[in-house]
Image (tube, helix red, strand yellow):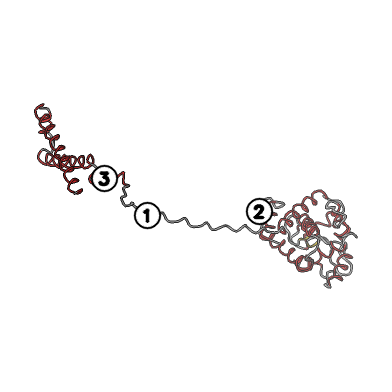
Amino acid sequence: MNRDTFFAQIRQEPFSGAMTQPQVDGITMLLDVWDRDHAGGDVRWLANVLGQTFHETGARMQPIREGFATTDAVARKIVAKAGYPYAAPDPQTGEVYYGRGLIQLTWADNYKKLGGILGCPLYEQPDLALDPDTACQILFTGMIQGLFTGRGLGYYFSDSNDDPMGARAIVNGHDRAALVAGYHMAFLKALRAADAPVEAAAPTATPEPEPAPMRPTTPAPWYPEDRRPYYRSGTVTGGTIAGAATTVATVGQAARSVDPKGEIAKSAISSPLIIIVLGVVALAFIGYMVWRHVSERKKAVR
């Protein structure tokens, strides 16, 4: 049983959101005795034991005297005032056998019977029923064997029977049977939740590390035959254009060094004579380059 789960559940119901340390200790004590002496038993039996104890102890889950009396003298006064027949002191022991323990054991005969079964002098010392361990033994033995009213847990909870309301008769007839059955169901829900198998979490796949981005590379220049630079062209037109472009670039660079703002160039270009002169020079240069190229090719042929 996962006790953390169990206590988390009962803290909400039937304990309405909070529990005291004595309540936790009392339930822990009952669970320990169940695990020690009745492990593997019908969980409905344990739920009913807890539900009946919750009611009989006023949710304290600790052994108490009848009427929640703090002393024997006070308890005697309570039962005498109520007129209960077991309120008279026993002629042999002088004790009053009012309700004590987790399940309110009453009557001298019941103290004798349980004392003989458990091997302790309950009849002679009835306050032993207030000892936590003895109180647990009285509770489980009496409810399982049906020593209190003649019918035990096996009568109401079996393969063919599931009767939490009727099970109230194990302790006290039909008194508050529906209420106690509600406590039973709250404890049973928590017990089943605590016994539920825990599903293993699916393993989380470790993602593959992303490859580091490659460093950008600059491809080496490559010129197919039909895309060579003009200065390497084997044609007349390409070589001529390359030479002219180089000349123009050289002239332009010289002009920028002399006239960085272009003022002189602007005024010169505005003159028609300059335009004519530049045109003649350009044509002459192109003609010269054509003649030179043809001459070189003729030499190569020879």
**Mark 2 residue element:** loop
Mark 3, residues whose alpha carbon is within 10 Å: few (<14), some, or many (≥20)?
Answer: few
Q: Quadrant of residue 249?
A: top left
Q: CA distance from mark 3 to mark 2?
A: 90 Å
Which residue is at the front of the view, 84 or 1? 1
Q: Quadrant of residue 161?
A: bottom right
Query: 119 or 88: which is nearer to us?
Result: 119
Residue with the mark numbered 3? 229
Asked whether disc 2 touches disc 1, contact meaning CB atoms under 8 Å apart, the reply is no
Q: Position of residue 141 (x, y in %)?
A: 83, 65
Percent x, y for residue 24?
68, 60
Residue 20, percent from left and from top: 66, 57
User: Which residue is located at x 86 percent, y 60 percent?
Assistant: 154
Q: Earlier in the sequence, mark 3 or mark 2?
A: 2
Tell me the kind of residue under disc 2.
Answer: Ala
- The residue singled out by tag 1 in the image is 215
Image quadrant where one finds the N terminus: bottom right
How many callouts does the rendering have? 3
Say which amino acid is labelled 3: Pro
Seen at 45% across and 56% down, the residue is 211
Identity of the residue drawn at 73% across and 66% down: 32
Q: Mark 2 sits on what residue? A: 18
Q: Secondary structure at mark 3?
A: loop
Q: Earlier in the sequence, mark 2 or mark 1?
A: 2
The label shown at residue 192 is none
In this picture, is 265 found above or below 19? above
Mark 1: which secondary structure? loop
